[in-house]
Image (spheres, rainbow, N blue to C red):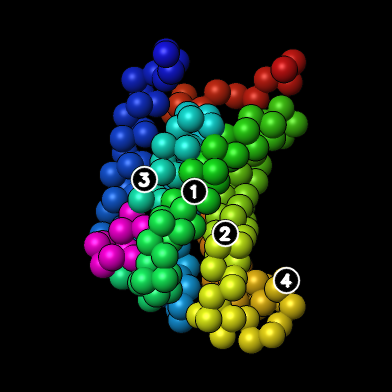
């Protein structure tokens, strides 16, 4: 099946993949705070989705998801929560770490396509960046609760709280920092890629 990707776009996807791997295997990608971490890996996923559409976003998301899962077994760093979840159920741990990131990248491609019909490139990229972090957190936490909500580990974390209140307090400042950084950086990088001709201008007629 023909992808329709231009050589410059394929080179960009390779660059984003390299950046994701660099972030995964160095302290650049995560800022660990308690059981969760502020992750900046959502930014290359957003940029891939902007430049290459849903397919490019999904590929970058898959790379992010795979490196996130590997942290559960101590490859490329270690996630305290991931190690525990892997010990409870390795298959569920893979699903919870991998699937949200693929869906995130896929959905971001459609979000950018929709946004650029109604806004300029910078705004479209910034909004896509925001949703990259927002959807990553939403999907990650949803599967965490669905797959592991009945385990002793999760029940101890929830501590009898309302589930929505638990999610909001649990992600807290981590999610806010991710959304702010992803919005600003993705908007700026997207605008630069537009000037370089990688991202086409909005087409009001579509």
Cα separation between marks 3 and 2: 19 Å
Q: Point out the residue furthest to the top here.
A: 2
Helix, strand or loop status at disc 2: helix
Circle 3 packing at 10 Å, graded few (<14), some (14-19), many (20+), is many
Q: Is residue 13 magenta?
A: no
Res 29 → quadrant: bottom left
Helix, strand or loop status at disc 4: helix
Q: Is 205 left or right of 104, judged from the image as shown?
A: right
Rendering coords of residue 166 (x, y %): 67, 77
| One can see residue 72 in this view | yes
Q: Quadrant of the C terminus?
A: top right
Residue under circle 2? 143
Cα separation between marks 4 and 2: 13 Å
Q: Would you place residue 197 above or below residue 93 in this image?
A: above
Q: Is 48 left or right of 66, judged from the image as shown?
A: right
Question: What stretch of residues is rendered in magenta?
Answer: 67-76
Circle 2 packing at 10 Å, graded few (<14), some (14-19), many (20+), is some
Residue under circle 1? 99
| One can see residue 121 in this view | no
Marked residue nearer the N-terminal end (3 or 4): 3
Predominant secondary structure, magenta span: helix
Residue under circle 3? 63
Rendering coords of residue 18 (x, y %): 28, 44
Q: How many marks?
A: 4
Who's the residue at 42% across and 65% down the image? 89
Q: Is residue 72 magenta?
A: yes
């Amino acid at each position: 099946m023909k992808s329709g990707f231009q050589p410059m776009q394929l080179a960009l996807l390779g660059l984003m993949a390299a950046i994701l791997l660099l972030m995964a295997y160095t302290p650049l990608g995560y800022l660990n705070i308690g059981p969760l971490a502020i992750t900046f890996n959502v930014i290359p996923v957003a940029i891939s989705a902007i430049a290459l559409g849903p397919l490019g976003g999904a590929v970058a998301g898959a790379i992010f998801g795979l490196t996130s899962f590997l942290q559960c077994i101590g490859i490329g760093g270690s996630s305290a929560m991931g190690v525990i979840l892997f010990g409870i159920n390795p298959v569920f741990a893979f699903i919870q770490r991998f699937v949200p990131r693929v869906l995130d990248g896929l959905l971001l491609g459609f979000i950018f396509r929709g946004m650029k019909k109604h806004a300029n490139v910078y705004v479209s990229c910034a909004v896509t960046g925001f949703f990259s972090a927002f959807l990553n957190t939403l999907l990650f936490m949803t599967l965490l609760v669905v797959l592991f909500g009945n385990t002793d580990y999760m029940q101890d974390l929830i501590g009898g709280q309302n589930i929505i209140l638990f999610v909001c307090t649990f992600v807290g400042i981590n999610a806010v920092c991710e959304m702010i950084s992803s919005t600003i950086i993705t908007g700026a990088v997207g605008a630069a890629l537009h000037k370089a001709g990688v991202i086409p201008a909005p087409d009001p007629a579509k």
